[in-house]
Amino acid sequence: MKEHGRIYLDHNATTPPLPEVTTAVARAMTESWGNPSTLYASGRQAREVLNVARTKVAALIGAADPSELTFTSGGTEGDNLALAGACQALANRGDHVITSITEHKAVLETCAALEGRGFRVTYLPVDGTGRVHPDAVRRAIRPGTILVSLMLANNEVGTINPVVEISGVCRDAGVLFHTDAVQGVGKIPVDVGTLGADLLTLSAHKFGGPRGAGALWSRSGTRILPVLRGGAQEHGLRPGTENVPAIHGFGAAAELAGRTLAERTQRLRLLRDLLWERIRREIPQAHVHGDLVNGLPNVLNVSFPAWDAEEMVLALDREGIEAGTGSACSTGKTEPSHVLLAMGVPPDEAAGAIRFSLGRGNTNEDIDTVVNVLARLCGCS
Ligand code: PLP
């Protein structure tokens, strides 16, 4: 899609808001400004907006009961609430948490904070495609394990974990299972009944919704305590006056995402495969990372040898193309991605990896333009 006359290929970072979402947010800003916790008409009206959005988000993830959803400020807060909230609630049963080394920082840094509070964390390795094996989870569970947190789909390479099998392992062992589904929801079918998780994080801005709105789904009966203090909103789990306009937009995005999912998934997969076919043909020294068959349909992570990822992103930017690096960038030096290193990618190759993540509106013409530019930058045209 030409966003502001440019080709936008970083939909895993964020997505342009859908026009229906922008309209919904603006409408709620002007019409539903009441405080949803109040008893009078404007408050009741705002509360009704929350109820409708909750029902729409619940439908997107197949949640039987909308009250299982707690609105948050996004995926980061949802992950913090899931991990810290569950550990706090279950501290009398044990102190051991299992996660993987390729999780998003929202999980990894929460785990580090939990370690600082005396919890012990096992960081599971991944295979060459970035996948955690259910057997590794089974072997890591021990007396005192209270929580397993493993992402549904990886943000950098798009690899999808075998979450159904992993949730089975956790259920058999009586251990709570959380999945960070921020990159999965809205891109692939996500049904909480099928996945079998107890806690699931999602975020609106990854599928056409506004930034700053997300949710934590928790299966009825799951023990979890609030992380923030100060009010009874969101069943007491997330105090603070709700961001009604953003949540209204979240509901609109969820409804549209559900309706268009099958068509978008198929179209993006074809487009992503075309992008890789063309890159492979034009730039034979390029390497792909992840799993194109069983990964997210919209993600292509590629290393261009002799290029540093940050330099490549800036060179593409000068050509009107926006793509991401999975890597942390500080003071102009790109750190190789922790995900690629965990997958066994050599550091110099990892340092040259670019993440293309496609979305609504990207076209075959965009692919032609991008591949021509890449081939020129790599000296292959
Ligand atoms: N988890 C994953 C896998 C993500 O990719 C992201 C965002 O990139 C987050 C969590 C954080 O979500 P948010 O930006 O809504 O805080």
Image (spheres, rainbow, N blue to C red):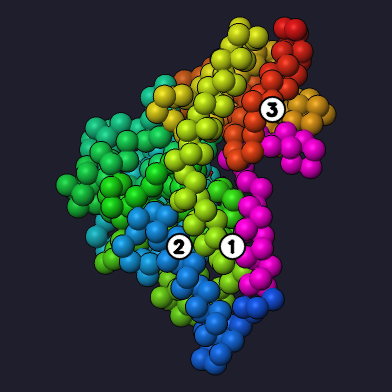
Q: Is residue 13 magenta?
A: yes
Asked if marks 2 and 1 touch (Cβ < 8 Å), the reply is: no
Q: Which quadrant would the N terminus be assigned to in this image?
A: top right
In the image, what residue type sits under mark 1? Gly
Work out how far the residue at label 1 is from the one at label 3, CA to CA, in angstroms: 28 Å
In the image, what residue type sits under mark 3? Asp
Near-viewer residue (124 or 289): 289
Q: Is residue 116 visible?
A: no
The residue beneath circle 1 is 249
The residue beneath circle 2 is 56
Of label 3 and label 2, which has the lower sequence position? 2
- The residue at the point 63 percent across, 46 percent down is 15
Q: Which residues are magenta?
A: 1-29
Q: How many other residues sit within 10 Å of disc 2, few (<14), some (14-19) or many (≥20)?
A: many
- Asked if residue 248 is positioned above or below residue 332 in the image, the reply reads below
Q: Position of residue 323 (x, y in %)?
A: 68, 32
- The residue at the point 58 percent across, 82 percent down is 35
Q: On residue 366, which mark appears?
A: 3
Q: Regarding mark 3 in the picture, which secondary structure is present there?
A: helix
Q: Is residue 67 magenta?
A: no
